[in-house]
Amino acid sequence: MTVESRPEHAATPAGGPSVHVIRARKLLIGGAVGGATAAALCLIVFSIGFGVSGLISAALAAAMVLFFYGVGQYVMVLFADAGARTLLAVSMCSYTARVVILGLVLVLYNAHHEAWPTLTPMVIFLTTIIVVAGWLAVEVFVFSRLRIGAYDTEYVPPSEGDFEP
């Protein structure tokens, strides 16, 4: 089978992004829409319920979640055409870096929480959970609508000359 006749090359339009990049972009956009929608809902609800403190807390939590997931999915878009091992290594490095950054932010907040009296921890917690759920719900919905072909190659029995006793 030549390179040109393999199915993964047949799906790539000339000069355009590969099908893998297109799928990764759809997941990024879908997740971002779900996360942003959930974030807007949290901003409205918690500013009504907790005032300015709720608005600031919800905005901070939503920004952290959207940054965390947005960077992660963007890395997947950038490396969508890479091999499986490379993609795994890059995604693990990206995840580790993002978790370390988030951990440092939380350590700094814990050390200086008296300087931030307007933050409401329960609002931060609930907003984080709701925005993550919004991102993932829409991302799963988009993924379920992606057209990912599953096929097997036609079976070709070995010829008489290929068999060695």
Image (cartoon, rainbow, N blue to C red):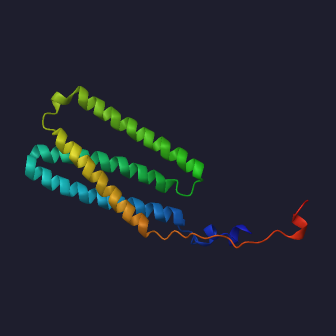
Residue shown at 13% from the left, 37% from the top: 118
Residue 105 in picture, x, y percent from top left: 30, 34
Residue 1: quarter of image: bottom right
Quadrant of the drawing holding the C terminus: bottom right
**View extreme (top): residue:** 111
Q: Is residue 51 visible?
A: no
Task: Name which quarter of the figure residue 159 lies in.
Answer: bottom right
- How many numbered marks, from 0 up? 0
Residue 128 visible? The answer is yes
- For residue 36, which quarter of the picture? bottom left
Q: Residue at 13% x, 46% y: name it.
A: 54
Q: Where is residue 102 shown, x and y percent of the image?
A: 34, 38
Q: Is residue 125 left or right of residue 152?
A: left
Q: Is residue 81 above or below residue 14?
A: above
Q: Is residue 81 above or below residue 7?
A: above
Residue 28 appears left or right of 59 = right
Q: Residue furthest front?
A: 165
- Residue at point 44%, 39% (across, down): 96
Q: Is residue 44 above or below residue 160?
A: above
**In x, y percent, where is residue 164?**
90, 60
Q: Is residue 22 above or below residue 46?
A: below
Asked whether, in this view, residue 25 is left or right of residue 158, the answer is left
Q: Nearer the viewer, residue 86 or 150?
A: 150
Using residue 105 as the reference point, say whether residue 144 is left or right of it.
right
On the image, the x and y values in percent for residue 26 come to 42, 64
Kindly identify the residue that appears in the image at 52 percent across and 46 percent down. Answer: 90
